[in-house]
Amino acid sequence: MVRLQNVLPSEIEAESFRIIESEFFEQTGKKITDYSEPEFRVLQRVIHATGDFALADTIVFQHDPITAAISAIRSGGNVLTDVNMVSSGVSKVNLDRFGGKVYCGVSDPEVAVYAKDKGITRSDAAMQLYHDRNIAVLAIGNAPTALVSALKLIDKGHFKPGVIVGVPVGFVNAAESKEMLKERAVPAITVSGRRGGSPIAAAITNALLKLALLN
C-alpha cells in the first residue's frame, strides 16, 4: 500500500530540501561540503526542480559565477531568457525587489522579422536585439543558437552579462555550445552534455535571486 507523506503545503519545499540534503551522499557519492554553501544551494534547487541527483555529476560553476550574479542582480540588472518557458519560471517578485525585469524577445514581431531577414533562429535574433538591456543573468535553457549568439557578442566586446546560466538541451549543438561556454573566461553555470532545459535554467536563476536576497 502506498503511504503519502503528511506535509503541510507551506512545508513542502522545506521538506523537499531536507530530503535532498539527507540523501545527497547516498545518491551522488559526493559530500555537501564538496561544494561551497552557495553552490550547493544552487544545485539543491536544480535537483528539487528535476528530481534528478545525477545532475551533481555534470553541473559546472566557472569563474565565481554566484558572486558575479549577486553583484549584478543587486545592482538592478535584468534577466534575459532564450524562450518564454524560462521567462515564465523566473520569480518576477524576487527580481522586482532589486528593480530588475525579465526579458524574452523570442515572440517579439521585430525579432521574427529580423530572424527571417538574416536566416537565423528567433532565439539567435533575440540575443542580438536584446543583449544591451543591462543583463545581470542570461538564462538559456532551450536554444543552443542563443548561447552561441551570446558568446559571439561577448567575443566582440558587445555583451557583458553578469553571469550566464547556459543549459540548452538537445541533440544538435547543445553539448557543443556548452563546451564553447567553458572555453570563455566568463562567470557561468552550466550542465555538461546534452541535458539541460527550461526548468533547470529557471531553477538556477531563482536560486541566484534567493541568494541575492540573503546576502
Image (cartoon, helix red, strand yellow):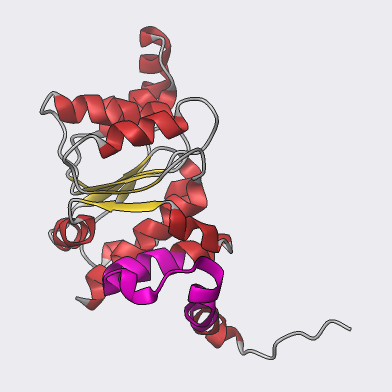
- Toward the viewer: 25 or 136? 25
Residue at image point 39% right, 16% down: 115
Query: Compared to 127, does 26 lie above or below?
Result: below
Residue that appears at 28% across and 63% down? 96
Residue 53 percent across, percent down from the top left: 53, 63
Is residue 199 part of the magenta span, yes or no? no
Q: Where residue 148 appears, x then y in whole percent?
A: 33, 27
Determine the residue positioned at 51% across, 43% down.
Answer: 195
Position of residue 182 in the picture relative to residue 32 (left or right): left
- Look at the image and tell me in which quarter the N terminus lies: bottom right
Is residue 94 among the parts visible in the rendering?
A: no
Task: From the top left corner, tell me how far across and down residue 25 is, in percent.
Answer: 48, 75
- Which of 209 and 169 lies nearest the eye of the viewer? 169
Considering only vertical position in the picture, is 15 above or below 44? below
Magenta residues: mostly which secondary structure? Answer: helix
Q: Quadrant of residue 103?
A: top left
| Front-most of residues 163 and 43 | 43
Outermost residue to the front: 29
Q: Is residue 143 visible?
A: yes
Using residue 127 as the reference point, say whether residue 194 is left or right of it.
Answer: right
Horizontal side, residue 91 vs residue 99: left or right: right
> Magenta part of the protein: which range?
17-45
- Quarter placement of the C terminus: bottom left
Residue 56 picture quarter? bottom left
